[in-house]
Image (cartoon, helix red, strand yellow):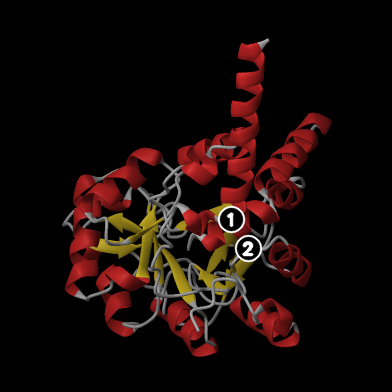
Amino acid sequence: MVIEMILAVLVGCYIISSLILFKFPMLVHKRKDVKFVCRHISHRGGAGENYENTLSAFRHAVELGTDMLELDCQLTRDGQVVVSHDSVLDVRTELKGAISEYDYAELPPIKEHIPIDFMPGTSFSSKSEDRRFPLLEEAFQHFPSTPINIDIKTDNNELIEKVSDLVKKYGREHITVWGNIKDVVTRKCYKMNPNVCLLFSARRVCVMLLQLYTGILPFMPVKETHLEIFMPAHMMKIYSSRFDVKWWHILVAKIANTLLIRRSLFEHLSKRGVQTYLWVMNTEEDFRCAFETGATGIMTDYPTKLKTFLEENPQYCLNHKLSLT
């Protein structure tokens, strides 16, 4: 009887302390000192309004007033850090093979018509002459004060080291976020340069959810500064027209959405200085749904649409918990 009472007291104390620290994490954790807050993030510079990952796309987004540029990096055969989402050239150029098989000078222009990945069945085309793969260094040179989110697309030590060197060369450690969905890549990024803001990998998201639902998250340190995730139900809606979706696919997506997309979780992370970005949202309905979850910011292929939405709905910009003012 005594043992049961002691266990009950211990469990009760654990639950109470977990709830208190979940609500007030600053009691045990130092708030992360992130130097920027992003509500408006341009995915690949705005893949629905310009050729993705080009300087023209980045320039357009920055002129609109985007808070952050999101881009992807690959390494060429001659060791150049090039901005490209795909590791192969087949989808977006007339050339075949991996980028790593070509020198930078050999890379062809982007096709005139390219697919928009998060708008199935939709492609982008333009009369713009800027269809060149830019170097990451060029992006740093042209947009020195704009926060940039870098997806390290391949597990390549040389790529990670060179990106880190460029970040340090241009004094951007305080306004750069990097990582990858793969945990091995994100861990290498953190080891290479822990001063750069860090994304959660997929594995770390799963670990965080396990910690959340067992109550230990409020006690655990978090090295990441940015949670960048998709809404499972949203992804199911986007791709249901392209795949043979079964009823259980929809059920799994709904359960995953319920477990992952939680305002209480985002608010807890926010109090610890961790920003949450939802991707990739491209309609007003998407924008409203994402901000209602308590996410810090939205990543979009249509920066003009998101800018207009925020101007028409200032409640999603005012009094945000992560405001630096």
Q: Position of residue 8 (x, y in %)?
A: 66, 23
Quadrant in the picture for residue 53: bottom left
**Element under disc 2:** loop
The label shown at residue 323 is: none
Up/down of 325 relative to 280, above or below: below
Quickly name the residue at label 1: 268
Which picture quadrant has residue 288?
Answer: bottom right
Please provide percent x and percent y for residue 29.
43, 54
Badge 2, how many Cα within 10 Å: few under 14, some, many 20+?
A: many
Q: Position of residue 281 (x, y in %)?
A: 66, 64
Q: In the depicted view, which residue is nearer to us: 216 or 4?
A: 4
Q: Nearer the viewer, mark 1 or mark 2?
A: 1
Nearest to the observer: residue 266 or residue 306 = 266
Q: Quadrant of residue 317?
A: bottom right
**Residue 262 location, x and y as percent?**
69, 51
Query: The residue under label 2 is which amino acid type?
Result: Ala
Farthest top residue in view: 1
Residue at 45 percent of width and 49 percent of height: 200
**Most distant residue in the right direction:** 247
247, above or below 273, in the image: above
Q: Residue at x 62, y 54 (%)?
A: 23
Q: Amino acid at mark 1?
A: His
Q: Which of marks 2 and 1 precedes in the sequence?
A: 1
- Measured in 3D between alpha carbons, the distance from the residue under mark 1 to the one under mark 2, in whole angstroms, is 11 Å
Name the image quarter holding the N terminus. Answer: top right
Residue occupying the point 53% across, 76% down: 50
Name the side, left or right, on which 306 lies relative to 233.
left
Which is more toward the observer, 171 or 318?
Answer: 318
Tag 2 residue = 295
Residue 286 appears in the picture as rendered: yes
SS assignment at label 1: helix
